[in-house]
Amino acid sequence: MKKLSGVLIGCGAIAREHLTALAELDNVEVSGVCDISSARAEAMAERFQVPKFYTNHRDLLDELKPDLVHITTPPASHLPIAMDCLERGLNVFCEKPMTVQYADFCLLKDKAIAKGTMLMENQQNRFHSSVRRILQLIETGELGDVLDVQICLSLNITGPNSAYTDMNAPHFGMTLPGGVIGDFLPHIAYLAYMFTGKALAVNAVWTKHTKCTPLPADEFRGLIKGERTTAFVSFSGNAQPDGFLIRVIGTRMRVEANLYEPPKVVSKRLRKGEPALMTVVDGIAEARQVLTGSIGGFVRKLAGQSSYDGMKDMLAATYRSIELKQPQPISLQELDEIAQLADQLSATAKP
């Protein structure tokens, strides 16, 4: 069976995660990688046994004509590179944020529609095991009506030796609306969107807790009113330990998951019986859920699988849609509404 071909443009840290996940897909082969640094491109090609490497992405596109182009460069370069791909009729899988401004996303969307090509943004947490389990609980009715969603991302971007605050080598996130936090807003936006639907109203507050850094803000709190429910979203650059928490509150159950930990969903449901006894039952159930998830995560790590839970499954779904000529896993309409939401959240940042 002929394999689908993929190429990567940009050979930084996130490219390694793409290549690690792609190595697990039997129907895909990576035919080339590209980076403006020849040494970096060659090293990446050697490490992942990719036959060709380039320093000019147009040469790669014209010579290899891949089934899918992975764009893993800094955000400011996404628009011109993606446009070069779409102009050639090539499918695009772009790292988040796909574009710095919503208006630029619209340019790419219109071009993809005109050319009949795929345009995807990496939203691997949609395919995270814990997120899929939460969605399953909603779809089966076990959780009941969704009353509220909380998405809280904590990442110590202000600590000693942080790459985000090195003034000698400014992080690319500093060029984004909202600064470095803007690099994480897409994750927050698409996860919130999965539960709320299209945003009807957005409010947010940005603050700076650690004063001696070049960051314009390191704390963010937002409230989204959506078509289906509301979501409280937050980013903390100071809270410890690091975590990516999702809590969904329903009329029959509440569930929690930390996407930075081994896949597991901790649930507490309405139980009949003596309250004191039910507290013990809940504690035992929670301990079992934590233990099961931890063992599974340990096994995944030993197997050398990607540390980004959901990456492999998202890429598998993307290549499958190309192979079978099916609609892309996340529609352009959804991507548009998510891009609008991220743009609305960014717009609340004060200069």
Image (cartoon, rainbow, N blue to C red):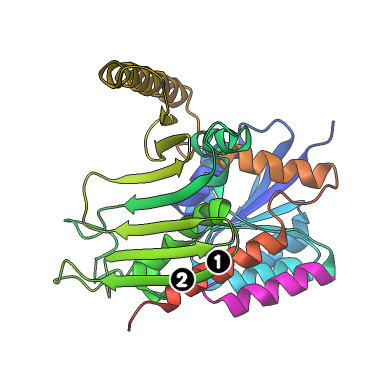
Magenta span: predominant SS is helix
User: Would you place residue 339 above or below residue 91 in this image?
Assistant: below
Q: Where is residue 262 in the image (x, y as percent from the top left)?
A: 40, 30
Q: For residue 82, which quarter of the picture?
A: bottom right
Q: Magenta span has 101? A: yes
Say which amino acid is labelled 2.
Answer: Val
SS state under label 2:
strand
Say which amino acid is labelled 1.
Answer: Ala
To which residue does mark 2 refer?
202
Query: Which residue occupies 61% across, 73% down?
Result: 79
- The crowding category of the residue bearing disc 2, from other C-alpha atoms within 10 Å (few below 14, some 14 to 19, many at least 20), is some
Query: Which residue occupies 55% across, 56% down?
Result: 196
Q: Position of residue 137 (x, y in %)?
A: 56, 33
User: Residue 210, can we see it?
Assistant: yes
| Residue, far left | 212
User: Would you place residue 277 above or below residue 160 in this image?
Assistant: above
Residue 199 is tagged as 1
Which contiguous range is marked in magenta?
A: 97-114
Q: Do the residues labelled 2 and 1 touch (CB within 8 Å)?
A: yes
